[in-house]
Image (cartoon, rainbow, N blue to C red):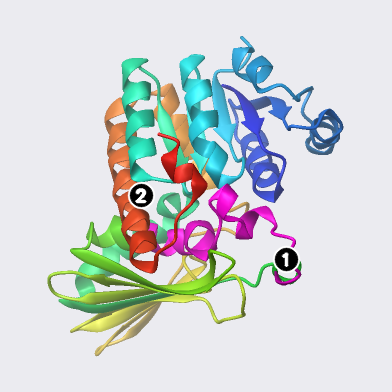
Amino acid sequence: MRIGTIGSGAITAQFISAVQATPGMEITAVYSRQKSRAEAFAAQTGVKSAYDNLLDLVSDDDIEVVYVASPNSMHYNHCKQALEAGKHVICEKPFTSTALQLSELITLAKEHNLMLFEAISVIYMPNFALIKQYLPVLGRIRMVQCNYSQYSSKYPAFLEKRLPNVFNPAFSGGALMDINVYNLHFLCELFGEPQQVHYLANRCEGIDTSGIVTAQYADFVAVCSGAKDSFSLNFAQIQGEKGYLNVTGGINGCAQIHLQTAQETTILNAQLPLNRLLPEVQALKDMLIQKDYARCHSRLEQSLRVMRLLDAARSSAGIHFPADSLS
């Protein structure tokens, strides 16, 4: 399975490392808008070909799958070009800027009998499977709390009005899209789509640097916090009438699970300290090789639910992106 990548950031390097550690998969080319950067990234990651022309990458007959990790606002167009060129696509989160854009990509993928995936690592982790397994032990769920915050190395530049991509509305940036999206995937994967959401955000220069999403379900409420402008203890906690489940270190890594009931305390951990993208890469490989379109389409429906939540949350906070009008 031969893969070409779009983007030259840290997450792309981590994805390439996971692919290179997975038998039967190979990264054959990388793309970046600057030729020198593409060549340097290819040398750094041990990839044979480097492109600075996107059309050349998606037209390469040696590539079967395109991995998209460009700035958020470019995801829609990059995915669309790859699908139109007959390539399967793996796209980093958030999938697109809007749910409508994702709906169009799903339609395009189905029309061309191609697979389309969102690269959201947490849902493929062994410890996430344990959370699903032990959730019934908690009884009736009454509250969910998630905090995934990471002080951004780009935040000082943002304060100096230099607008790095991750804090730039033109690139569909901000804390909700970049970091709180993990919490929303966690919530939606376990409990489905909430009845309503609301986003309270710390805003500056038209972008959210941190914020809290509140989600209302029929029987419980959930709070998802995400920040790129401050430090925090990261965690996820599900509170039930018979006990609670605490994910230490936050849901992005699902490093360890603390299960507490009236009867006992249990520490759950099924993960090895390896590249956290390995389970995701293996799962995507299996779906592609087995041509498991049913599972692929099920995953797309889940991604679409999360995109609808992101749309609703941004709307409630009055956050709009130029890329919203792309579709």
Q: Please, is residue 18 above or below residue 127 in the view?
A: above
Find residue 218 and report its horizontal and vertical position in percent: 12, 70
Find residue 197 and report its horizontal and vertical position in percent: 28, 67
Quarter residue 37 falls in: top right
Q: Element under label 2?
A: helix
Find residue 195 and report its horizontal and vertical position in percent: 18, 63
Q: Residue furthest top?
A: 61
Which residue is located at x 64 percent, y 17 percent? 55
Q: Which residues are magenta?
A: 159-186
Q: Amino acid at mark 1?
A: Lys
Which residue is located at x 43 percent, y 40 percent? 325
Q: Please, is residue 82 above or below residue 102 in the view?
A: above
Mark closer to the observer (1, 2):
1
Label 2 Cα neighbours within 10 Å, binned few <14 / some 14-19 / many ≥20: many
Total marks in image: 2
Q: Amino acid at mark 2?
A: Met
Find residue 229 and report its horizontal and vertical position in percent: 62, 75
Using the image, tell me which numbered label, if any, was put on residue 161. 1
Quarter residue 30 falls in: top right
Q: Element under label 1?
A: loop
Does 6 appear in magenta?
Answer: no
Which residue is located at x 56 percent, y 38 percent? 74
The reply, left or right, for residue 148 in relation to residue 115 is right
Using the image, tell me which numbered label, if any, was put on residue 307. 2
